[in-house]
Image (cartoon, grey):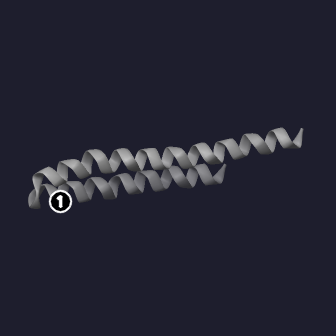
Amino acid sequence: MVSITIIKFLYILGLFMITLGGLSGLFVEPLAGIATLIIGNLFWRIFCESLILVFSIHQELVKLNSK
């Protein structure tokens, strides 16, 4: 499904951006940079996985409805 592919692409893009922000934050405030690297990437992963789950459930419901 196209939506899941787009979400996976956006996940990688967001992962890169959050990691880049966390690494640059290490120079300004080390603790905040580490927190951004860990917590930011964790929440981004949970958010993207939730979106994939919703679209997967929708896809399965459409299959069941067509039977």
Where does residue 61 sit, x and y in percent of width and height? 76, 42
Name the image quarter holding the C terminus: top right
For image coordinates 18% across by 53% down, the residue present is: 33
The furthest residue to the right: 67
Left or right: residue 20 compared with residue 50: left
Q: Relative to 15, does residue 53 appear above or below in the rendering?
A: above
For image coordinates 33% across by 54% down, the residue present is: 16
Left or right: residue 41 compared with residue 22: right
Disc count in the image?
1
For image coordinates 36% across by 52% down, the residue present is: 15
Residue that mark 1 sits on: 24
Where does residue 46 sit, x and y in percent of width and height? 44, 44
Tell me the SS state at disc 1: helix
- Residue 62 occupies which quadrant of the picture? top right
Left or right: residue 17 compared with residue 51: left
For image coordinates 64% across by 53% down, the residue present is: 2
Q: Relative to 27, does residue 1 appear above or below in the rendering?
A: above
Where does residue 41 sit, x and y in percent of width and height? 34, 48
Where does residue 6 sit, x and y in percent of width and height? 56, 55
Front-most of residues 20 and 38: 38
Front-most of residues 38 and 13: 38
Which amino acid type corresponds to the residue marked 1 in the rendered image?
Answer: Ser
Left or right: residue 6 compared with residue 32: right
Q: Residues within 10 Å of mark 1 (few under 14, many from 20)?
A: few
